[in-house]
Amino acid sequence: MRKLTVEQEQLIVDFFRKHIKMDDFQKELESREEHRKLPLNILEKSRMKSMTEIDFGKLISNLWATSLWGNKDYLVQKIIDDNGMDKIRAQFGDILYGTDPFEKRFDRFEIKGLGHASLTEILCLFDPNEFSIWNNKARIALEKLKFEDLPLGKYRISGEEYKRINEAMESIAKKFPDLGLHDVDLLAVDYFLYEVWKEVEREKEIPEERNEFDHDEIKDLIKEIGAQLGFETDTEELVAPGAQVDVIWRAKIANLGAVTYVFEVHKKGSIDSLILNLQRALNNPTVRKIIAVSDKTQLEKIRDETKSLPENFRKAFTFWEALDVKETHEKLSAAIQSISKLELVSSQF
């Protein structure tokens, strides 16, 4: 079992005593235990074998990871259309009830459209004594608490990395009895980390040079932004011969037919290859804009490389800074969440 360092212990104790109100913490834990009832019922072994689309829709739409989606029906139906219920049932059956080592089951779990934030939340709700939630808030909080040996910069993790993360979360849970909390699980740790994250957000100062981002995370955020804006979205799509792109937004417009916007997220590698891929994408007559997404430094290099290219390419080409994608996603999600409270659109889930 992993042990906390002296520095980690002190940071946890200091934060808890300074920022956590025991009554609020206990009420949140009760709320979270209530939140488990629906997924536990749906994921019960005998019921899960015949999981319906409605069951799956309820499971996904009730996750905290999907709380910022304005149109959850679209999200659920997209996942079902992309995978099929047979595959969804088989994948959940394997990861929850399979006999192979868990790390192997985690690595081979693959449901298109279901990211690790949603998957680990489902696992945590299923068994909070064994599994933790791995999302952006947890990563930021763990960085604040000096868990620097964990893969804090990674959006997608391996089964072995998830095992290490769970061990770290368990070490935090074992500190709680010293603070007056007993019989806590990793859902309680998740709430604690959420409170740490809120404090980090209050303290945060954005540096001038903002270059760190995770390729897969940014790709999924762009997809979600497009879906929230009403576009049909997809990732890893072949839009033209030789041109597979990270994300597309597509709209059907009466007098124009389909209009497609193409996004390529560039973190490292050949800029020439990036540009060539986007040039090929323009061979699709529906493509109206091609967007390179990266950090500020890389975008400047890409701009320099494209100055001598034909005018039609330069007119279609534009740039989006990765951190701006994150900020756009946060602000748009907050706006949509606020509007959702009006209940203008009803959901079948």
Image (spheres, rainbow, N blue to C red):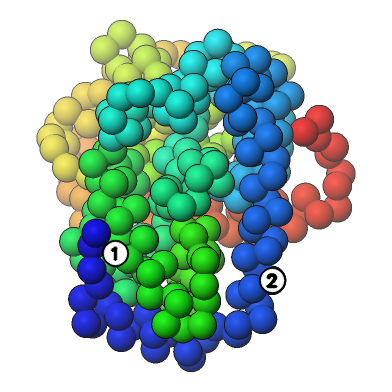
Instruction: Give the mark, 1 or 2, whose residue is nearer the N terminus.
Output: 2
Give the number of the mark in front: 1 or 2: 2
Tell me what residue is drawn at x 28 percent, y 30 percent.
101
Q: Secondary structure at mark 2?
A: helix
Of the numbered discs in the image, which one, if any, rests on residue 27? 2
- Res 178 seen here: yes
| Nearer to us in this view, 112 or 254 | 112
- In what quadrant of the picture does the N terminus appear? bottom left
293 vs 189: above or below: above
**Residue in the foreground of this view, choosing between 136 and 31:** 31
Specify whether 334 is left or right of 162. right
Q: Position of residue 58 (x, y in %)?
A: 71, 34
Residue 63: image x %, image y %?
62, 45
Is 308 or 33 nearer to us in this picture?
33
What separation in Å lies between label 1 and label 2 (alpha carbons)?
38 Å
What's under tag 2, amino acid-wise? Lys
- Asked if residue 327 lies left or right of residue 272, the reply is right
Is 222 above or below relative to 166? Answer: above
Q: Quadrant of residue 32?
A: bottom right
Foreground: 174 or 74?
174
- Which labelled disc corresponds to residue 71? none
Write the residue at 46% across / 83% down: 179
What is the crowding at mark 2: few (fewer than 14 residues within 10 Å), some, or many (at least 20)? few
In the displayed structure, would residue 300 be above or below residue 293? below
In what quadrant of the picture does the C terminus appear? top right
The amino acid type, in three-letter code, at marker 1 is Arg
With 239 as the anchor, is 100 left or right in this view?
left
Residue on which disc 1 sits: 210
Q: What number of labels is visible?
A: 2
Pinpoint residue 65: horizontal percent, then vertical percent: 56, 47
Q: Counting other residues with Cα less than 10 Å from the Cα at mark 1, is it few (<14), some (14-19), or many (20 or more)?
A: some
